[in-house]
């Protein structure tokens, strides 16, 4: 497929590497210009372009940027055909994004994003940490392969999102509509807990929407406390251990 990725942070970089390595035609843009995208990100065949170029003549646009920057993408995506699949990987973190009244009042993050963009979206790759995403992909059929939920309102969009998740080395789990995607948001039992396809249904079923914000903020506070002490920087698995303890 022809894929344009906006954002070259930890998740965006891995998406470029994995999807271009899987044979897709991948373009990537960031906010600082194509010359600032590292060569190793493009080693599998991805191409660095401007944001305007990234959304032209593509089957899929993937937004891998902080949720607070989503509204700024509306004008750019207004030029993209309605049949183009738009996938969002973001999550709401008030300390980074600023408080968004609608989400604070209970609106599902994905529905807020779709409303800001004025078009249907897919929510995928938002429920895995950057280290796990970069290092834990496995071939299809591996018994302990991590599963990632994929939510969308259009069935065709969800199928495309699921196929691409599989191409990045993870089992794709049909998570239904965007209205149900709160079950894969920060604070939920399947958020950054590296669960398998067999474990995922029960984790999603036990999610409690009212408890997600407090659990999310507890995890942020714990990570910030650890990062503030240079002698106690968390190892790469700390986030998974923490979210499993707090969210499940």
Image (spheres, rainbow, N blue to C red):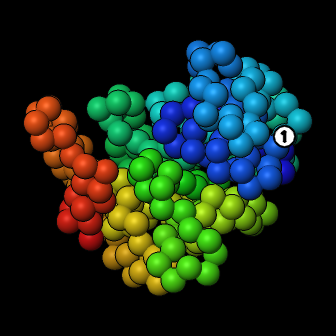
**Quarter that holds the C terminus:** bottom left
- Judging depth in this view, the residue of 223 and 46 nearest the camera is 46
Q: Is 144 on the left or on the right of 74, as rendered? A: left
Residue at screen point 79% across, 63% down: 156
Residue at screen point 31% across, 50% down: 236
| Residue 69 image position (x, y, % from top left) | 52, 27
Height in image: 81 above or below 147? above
Q: Is 85 on the left or on the right of 228, as rendered? A: right
> Which residue is disc 1 drawn over?
58
Height in image: 185 above or below 81? below
| Residue 26 image position (x, y, % from top left) | 76, 40
- Density class for disc 1 (Cα within 10 Å; few <14, some 14-19, many ≥20) is many
Residue 234 shows in this picture: yes
- Judging depth in this view, the residue of 2 and 94 nearest the camera is 2
- Judging depth in this view, the residue of 231 and 212 nearest the camera is 231
Residue at screen point 82% across, 35% down: 80
| Residue 66 image position (x, y, % from top left) | 48, 34
Q: Is 106 on the left or on the right of 222, as rendered? A: right
The image quarter in which residue 191 lies: bottom left
- Judging depth in this view, the residue of 179 and 38 nearest the camera is 38
């Amino acid at each position: 497929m022809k894929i344009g990725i906006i954002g070259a942070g930890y998740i965006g970089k891995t998406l470029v590497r994995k999807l271009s390595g899987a044979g897709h035609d991948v373009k990537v843009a960031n906010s600082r210009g194509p010359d600032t995208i590292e060569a190793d990100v493009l080693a599998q065949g991805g191409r660095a372009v401007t944001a305007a170029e990234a959304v032209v003549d593509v089957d899929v646009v993937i937004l891998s940027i902080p949720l607070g920057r989503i509204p700024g993408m509306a004008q750019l995506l207004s030029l993209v055909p309605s049949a183009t699949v738009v996938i969002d990987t973001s999550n709401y973190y008030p300390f980074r994004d600023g408080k968004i009244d609608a989400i604070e009042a209970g609106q599902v993050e994905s529905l807020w994003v779709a409303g800001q963009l004025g078009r249907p979206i897919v929510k995928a790759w938002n429920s895995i940490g950057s280290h796990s995403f970069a290092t834990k992909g496995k071939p299809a059929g591996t018994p302990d392969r991590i599963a990632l939920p994929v939510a969308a309102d259009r069935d065709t969009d969800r199928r495309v999102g699921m196929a691409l998740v599989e191409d990045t080395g993870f089992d794709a789990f049909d998570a239904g509509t965007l209205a149900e995607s709160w079950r894969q948001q920060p604070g939920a039992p399947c958020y950054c807990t590296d669960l398998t396809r067999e474990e995922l249904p029960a984790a999603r079923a036990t999610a409690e929407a009212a408890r997600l914000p407090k659990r999310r903020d507890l995890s942020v506070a714990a990570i910030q406390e650890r990062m503030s002490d240079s002698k106690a920087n968390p190892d790469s698995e700390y986030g998974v251990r923490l979210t499993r303890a707090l969210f499940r």
